[in-house]
Image (cartoon, rainbow, N blue to C red):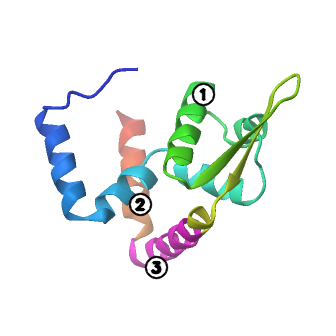
Amino acid sequence: MSKKKLNSTNTLNEYYLDERCTLNKVLRIVGKRWVSEILVLVKEDVSRFSNLKECLNGISDNVLSNVLNELVTAQLIEKEIFKEVPIRVEYRITASGLELVEVLHELCNWGKKNIPYEIRIQPILRNKSS
């Protein structure tokens, strides 16, 4: 995995925006692909890696592992490792993760009411015709 250049303009801009507004940090986490789906699944007790993988059609093991680790680091989910053979790992949503899922549902409802359907699907259609 490539590391970010700490002195690049993009990285410096990210740090600047993060210092000015916590919302930028939140959006950087929840705006990543698969995050909202994983949070909802873990909330619904689909908590083992293999169960999550089954429910998320098209996600690679590496991406799922990376996103889960980021969510653990952000304290939105907890990871419990059982000392068994084979090893068993379970994920549970935290209280702050539950709060975030509620906010995401509200954002989704807002989007359904305020963003016309044509605008929501246009980028998808444009990419398929290319």
Which residue is depicted at the point 32% across and 64% down?
23
Name the residue tied to disc 2.
120
Element carrying mark 2: helix
Magenta residues? 99-115
Q: In the image, which disc is placed on residue 2?
A: none
Percent across and percent down for residue 95 are 62, 67
- CA–CA distance in space, label 3 to label 2: 12 Å
Name the residue tied to disc 1.
60
Q: Which amino acid does label 2 sit on?
A: Arg
Quick check: 16 above or below 55? Answer: below
Q: In the image, which disc is placed on residue 113?
A: 3
Percent across and percent down for residue 4 are 27, 28
Decide if residue 34 is in sight here. no
The residue nearer to you, when weighing 59 against 86, is 86
Q: Residues within 10 Å of mark 3 (few under 14, many from 20)?
A: few
Quick check: 75 above or below 54? Answer: below
The residue nearer to you, when weighing 126 against 79, is 79
Q: Does the magenta stretch include residue 109?
A: yes
Which residue is depicted at the point 31% across and 24% down?
3
Quick check: 23 above or below 71? Answer: below
Q: Does the magenta stretch include residue 71?
A: no
Where residue 127 sits, quadrant-wise, is top left
Percent across and percent down for residue 94 are 63, 60
Q: Which amino acid does label 3 sit on?
A: Lys
- CA–CA distance in space, label 1 to label 2: 25 Å
What predominant SS class does the magenta segment belong to? helix
Percent across and percent down for residue 45 are 78, 55
Q: Nearer the N terminus, badge 3 or badge 1?
A: 1
The residue nearer to you, when weighing 111 against 79, is 79
Which residue is depicted at the point 42% across and 51% down?
29
